[in-house]
């Protein structure tokens, strides 16, 4: 066991704090029984800072701490484009999509599709999202979290998966979104403080005891790892099986700024249930938008926490600074240095006390995301599948009960599937690619649904149904096409089909369920405008410096 008694005290204290807080905030006032609004939307009472903190805690998970650090090890700072472009995407979502969602008073993203199109589109996308959340999101977070437990504490992978699932279940299934969101506020504090501690120590190691010197050494030792826009053939990275592949396949040049990256980011931040659910639970539109700004500032900070340590690990391995470190990063079954072992191995370098804090931060990221994904899975199943087909007259108590059962079943399925991900080198890229099979269709039906009144229900159904088949065909026929570019191509094909079908069916008329877009809908506060201006300026400066 690599954690000292003080580390264990810190970690156990964190666990008890989160469980206790989750149970405490889940309690209802005497005489009030928890209803669907309480369970799925936290009674619509979240302030802006809780919205922003919960957004980040739900987003930052093992896939960032471990997966993105692993990609930082292999790819360098270029992987930060997911974080910095996400900050820009949050502004777009806050201005153009949140006002529509909140005005509609929806619970779920499929619920919006029912309101805008029809029940067929709603059910199709609800099923797609349920499969994605359970078999890609929940599964990958459980696997990466268990990998960290295996590397740090030598906990067998299966036991780690079961333990993390049970931890997240203890408070989230009982309390619903209210428990998840309010504990997320505490989780973010652990996440940032523990993450910065790991960054500081890793830079100290590279810099011979001086963290600032270490940061300078990174740019000097591996200048290629600080290129944000990769060219074809510029960098070869491990493929997970002993060979190499072109990093351009993961991050294809300017496409990360003007191409498919916008599709994946808007699909995630704008149309993804376990993200938008936090904003839908805000006290008001203004509070929701302020929460998005807060989350945007935190996203700008994340590469310092999750990418820089990965680059530092690359230097440590490249220069042979610590043979024990290299040994810890080596997969015992293949004998290969595994990118996704970078962050868990770095945690072992921390001094007593800080190691417990950093481990708590990693666990906080894991369980908060697990809780969020499971809660959103239960929300979609209950509101869009169960109520529609099985429980049209279900009481509020029955809806909450079904939600809890659904979350438990989702955890069980994900825990069974998770060990199969052990063969991956960069789990973060696995998540992005296979989420990208559905993202073009999601983006198309929401974008046209909001901004083009002529979009018909059949056009949306075609967009939803063809996204995965088209993505698979392009992957098979053009294996050298980067998946980000593939998403862009699929979106363009779907857009053309949806436009053609809508014009043919509607004969130029607006769809009866179209959304009335007017300038008053998109008004924002002065504080939001100032925050958006600052975030935009910082993003522009970062890309200019690291181009």
Image: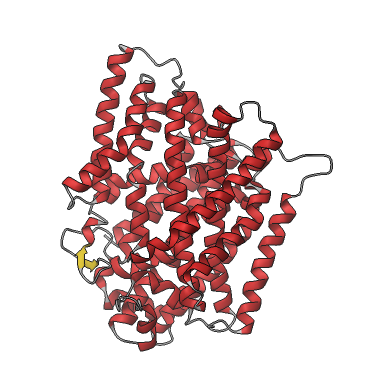
Residue 43 in view here: no
Residue 379 % position (x, y):
57, 40
Dividing the picture into quarters, in which one does residue 337 lie?
bottom left
How does the figure colour the protein chain or chains?
Answer: secondary structure
Nearer-the-camera pick, 176 or 185: 176
Asked if residue 19 is positioned above or below residue 380 in the image, the reply reads: below
Whole-percent x, y for residue 113 in the image: 46, 29
Determine whether, in the image, residue 201 is placed left or right of residue 471. Answer: right
Residue found 36% across the figure and 42% down from its top: 439
- Vertical side of 169 occupied by 191: above or below: below
Q: Is 173 placed left or right of 325 in the picture?
A: right
Decide if residue 117 is on the left or right side of residue 185: left
Quick one: 284 or 462, which is closer to the camera?
Answer: 462
Quarter that holds the N terminus: bottom right
Residue 492 visible = yes
Identify the residue shown where x is 54% and y is 38%: 381
Q: Residue at left 63%, top 82%?
A: 6
Front residue of 495 and 234: 495
Figure label count? 0
Residue at (34%, 64%) from the top-left corner?
426
The quadrant holding residue 77 is bottom left
How far across and down, in percent of the image, does residue 511 sit? 40, 16
The extreme right residue here reads 30
Q: Quadrant of the C terminus?
A: bottom left
Percent position of residue 407, x then y: 58, 48
Q: Nearer the viewer, residue 334 or 4?
A: 334
């Amino acid at each position: 066991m690599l954690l000292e008694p003080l580390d264990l005290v810190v970690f156990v204290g964190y666990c008890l704090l989160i469980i206790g807080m989750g149970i405490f905030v889940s309690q209802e006032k005497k005489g009030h029984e928890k209803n669907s609004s309480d369970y799925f939307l936290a009674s619509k009472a979240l302030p802006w800072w809780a919205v922003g903190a919960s957004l980040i805690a739900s987003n930052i998970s093992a896939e960032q701490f471990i997966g993105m650090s692993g990609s930082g090890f292999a790819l360098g700072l270029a992987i930060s484009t997911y974080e910095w472009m996400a900050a820009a995407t949050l502004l777009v979502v806050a201005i153009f999509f949140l006002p529509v969602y909140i005005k509609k008073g929806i619970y779920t993203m499929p619920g919006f599709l029912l309101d805008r199109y029809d029940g067929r589109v709603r059910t199709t996308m609800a099923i797609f999202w349920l499969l994605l959340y359970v078999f890609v999101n929940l599964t990958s977070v459980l696997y990466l979290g268990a990998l960290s437990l295996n590397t740090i504490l030598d906990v067998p992978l299966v036991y780690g998966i079961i333990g993390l699932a049970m931890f997240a279940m203890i408070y989230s299934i009982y309390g619903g979104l209210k428990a998840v969101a309010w504990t997320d506020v505490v989780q973010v504090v652990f996440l940032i403080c523990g993450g910065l501690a790991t960054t500081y120590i890793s830079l100290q190691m590279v810099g011979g005891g001086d963290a600032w010197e270490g940061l300078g050494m990174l740019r000097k030792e591996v200048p290629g790892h600080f290129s944000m826009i990769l060219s074809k053939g510029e960098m070869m990275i491990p493929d997970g099986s002993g060979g190499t592949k072109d990093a351009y396949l993961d991050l294809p040049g300017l496409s990360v700024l003007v191409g498919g990256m916008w599709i994946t980011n808007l699909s995630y931040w704008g149309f993804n249930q376990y993200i938008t659910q936090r904003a839908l639970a805000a006290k008001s539109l203004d509070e929701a938008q302020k929460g998005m700004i807060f989350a945007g500032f935190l996203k700008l900070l994340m590469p310092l926490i999750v990418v820089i340590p990965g680059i530092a690990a690359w230097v440590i391995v490249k220069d042979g600074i610590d043979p024990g470190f290299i040994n810890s990063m080596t997969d015992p079954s293949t004998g290969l240095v595994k990118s996704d072992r970078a962050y868990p191995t770095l945690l072992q370098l921390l001094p007593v006390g800080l190691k417990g804090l950093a481990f708590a931060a990693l666990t906080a990221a894991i369980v908060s995301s697990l809780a969020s994904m499971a809660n959103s899975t239960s929300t979609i199943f209950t509101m869009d599948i169960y109520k529609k087909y099985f429980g049209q007259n279900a009481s509020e108590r029955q809806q909450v009960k079904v939600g809890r059962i659904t979350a438990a079943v989702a955890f069980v399925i994900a825990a069974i599937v998770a060990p199969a991900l052990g063969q991956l080198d960069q789990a973060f890229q696995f998540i992005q690619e296979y989420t990208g099979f559905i993202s073009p269709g999601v983006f198309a039906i929401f974008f046209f649904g909001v901004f083009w009144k002529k979009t018909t229900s059949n056009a949306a159904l075609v967009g939803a149904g063809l996204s995965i088949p088209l993505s698979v065909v392009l992957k098979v026929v053009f294996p050298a096409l980067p998946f980000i570019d593939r998403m862009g191509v699929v979106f363009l094909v779907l857009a053309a089909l949806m436009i053609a079908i809508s014009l043919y069916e509607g004969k130029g008329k607006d769809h009866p369920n179209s959304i009335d877009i007017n300038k008053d809908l998109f008004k924002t506060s002065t504080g939001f405008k100032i925050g958006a201006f600052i975030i935009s300026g910082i993003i522009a400066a970062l890309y200019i410096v690291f181009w």
